[in-house]
Image (cartoon, helix red, strand yellow):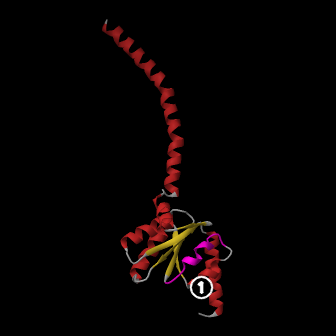
């Protein structure tokens, strides 16, 4: 790799690390090309990305970013999964690791917080941002629905009472 290409790779990685909210480090030794493509596809569908880079270049790119804490985890053949949604990359990584025993999660970082394997699993178990938004909307809409039902209930009862008197008068 030429010096200019290395510099460009470091700049691109640095930009990715600056804009990401979570970075997961995993070792991928022994995975086939098809398995790596499947991982990339799953990450892309979840809104995350996967980067494979020389560890030395990645450590240089980490300087000055919030996820600098993952530097010591970069040993051996590693892959770095990043996402802006704090749950997307960990969720896909954990699911992929369950299906592929050669994909081993080393740890990660969420902002300046260092995560071990258990921390990554805990993040993966959280609901995604879209699921949380749906729950919040449901909670906001529920009181309005109940209020509308309560407002309509007295009118409905009054109409039933009048209907009962009217049918009672017809029967007599």
Please tell me which residue is depicted at 55% across the width and 83% down the height of the picture.
53
- Of residues 6 and 113, the one nearer the viewer is 113
Q: Which residues are magenta?
A: 65-76
Q: Residue furthest left?
A: 171
Image: 55 above or below 138: below
- Helix, strand or loop at disc 1? helix
Please tell me which residue is depicted at 40% across the width and 83% down the height of the picture.
30
- Of residues 171 and 41, the one nearer the viewer is 41
Residue 156, quarter of the rendered image: top left
Image x and y of residue 54, in percent: 56, 85
Image x and y of residue 93, in percent: 45, 70
Total numbered labels placed on residues in the image: 1
Q: Residues within 10 Å of mark 1 (few under 14, many from 20)?
A: few
The quadrant of the image that shows the N terminus is bottom right
- Is residue 70 within the magenta segment? yes
Image: 123 above or below 8: above
Please tell me which residue is depicted at 63% across the width and 69% down the height of the picture.
19
Q: Is residue 162 left or right of residue 89?
A: left
Image x and y of residue 41, in percent: 45, 73
Q: Residue furthest right?
A: 64
Residue 163 appears anywhere in the view: yes
- Is residue 51 within the magenta segment? no
The quadrant of the image that shows the C terminus is top left
- Of residues 40 and 109, the one nearer the viewer is 109
Residue 22 appears anywhere in the view: no
Q: Which residue is mark 1?
A: 56
């Amino acid at each position: 790799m030429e010096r200019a290409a290395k510099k460009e790779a470091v700049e691109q990685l640095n930009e990715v690390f600056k804009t990401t909210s979570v970075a997961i480090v995993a070792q991928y030794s022994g995975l086939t090309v098809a398995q790596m493509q499947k991982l990339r596809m799953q990450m892309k569908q979840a809104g995350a990305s996967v980067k494979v880079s020389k560890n030395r270049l990645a450590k240089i790119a980490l300087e000055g970013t919030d996820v600098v804490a993952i530097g010591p985890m970069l040993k051996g053949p590693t892959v770095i999964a990043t996402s802006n949604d704090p749950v997307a990359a960990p969720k896909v990584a954990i699911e992929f690791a369950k299906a592929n025993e050669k994909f081993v999660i080393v740890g990660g970082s969420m902002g300046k917080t260092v995560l071990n394997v258990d921390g990554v699993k805990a993040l993966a178990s959280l609901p995604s941002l879209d699921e949380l938004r749906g729950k919040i909307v449901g909670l906001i809409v529920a009181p309005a629905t109940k209020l509308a039902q309560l407002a309509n209930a007295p009118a409905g009862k009054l109409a039933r009472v009048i209907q009962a008197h009217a049918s009672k008068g017809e029967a007599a």
